[in-house]
Image (cartoon, rainbow, N blue to C red):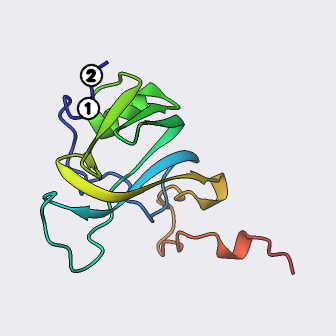
Amino acid sequence: MRTATDIQTKDPHSELPQYGSKPKKPGLYLGLFHGRHDPREHMSDWGFDGPAIGPLKWCHTTYASKIKIEFENAADAAEYFGVTQDPFELSVDADLLVFGGMYYGDWTVYYVPPEDCERPADTFRETTRVNNFIAHRKFFL
């Protein structure tokens, strides 16, 4: 199995869904944040948010040094890694997860339900609708 560092990853700040934003598909995601450009970079703040990688079938950590992931659909892997192989192995350098040449001090695995996904582009209205579902959520008192 080739690792993600062996594969040319796309720029993590390009069109990839960012952690904290609404992804297009529901499912399990690996969210990267507290990012920096260099592992020795002095941090006076929390750094930047990285991508939300997914949707995934699973995420597994081995001895806090390797993180293995498998996509729900192997074709989704191409968006992040440029190839459709599964599973992928992300490396940890010291205590930072490495993705796309960037280093992340924090990562989380979380589930995004269908109602929290980005809505498709609204192409038939003159005024586009707001891309949130607040009015459709049910709150229990």
Report how far apart the C-alphas of labels 1 and 2 lie in the structure. Answer: 13 Å
Which of these two is toward me, 112 or 131? 112
Q: Position of residue 32 (x, y in %)?
A: 37, 56
**How busy is the neighbourhood of tag 2: few (under 14 within 10 Å), some, or many (20 plus)?**
few
Q: Which residue is mark 2?
A: 2
* Residue at screen point 24% across, 57% down: 13
N-term mark: 1 or 2: 2
The disc labelled 1 sits on which kind of residue?
Answer: Gly
Q: Is residue 140 left or right of residue 76?
A: right
Which of these two is toward me, 71 or 5? 5
Up-down relation of residue 77 to residue 125 (above or below): above
Q: Residue furthest top?
A: 1
The disc labelled 2 sits on which kind of residue?
Answer: Arg
Task: Label 2: state its secondary structure.
Answer: loop
* Residue at screen point 44% across, 34% down: 69
Q: Position of residue 46 (x, y in %)?
A: 30, 74
**How busy is the neighbourhood of tag 1: few (under 14 within 10 Å), some, or many (20 plus)?**
some
Up-down relation of residue 134 to residue 82 (above or below): below
Q: Position of residue 103 (x, y in %)?
A: 23, 54
Q: Is residue 72 left or right of residue 100?
A: right
Q: Quadrant of residue 42?
A: bottom left
* Residue at screen point 39% across, 42% down: 64
Can you say which quadrant of the picture contains the C terminus?
A: bottom right
Up-down relation of residue 133 to residue 121 (above or below): below
Q: Position of residue 127 (x, y in %)?
A: 48, 75
Can you say which quadrant of the picture contains the N terminus?
A: top left
Task: Label 1: state its secondary structure.
Answer: loop
Q: Which residue is mark 1?
A: 82
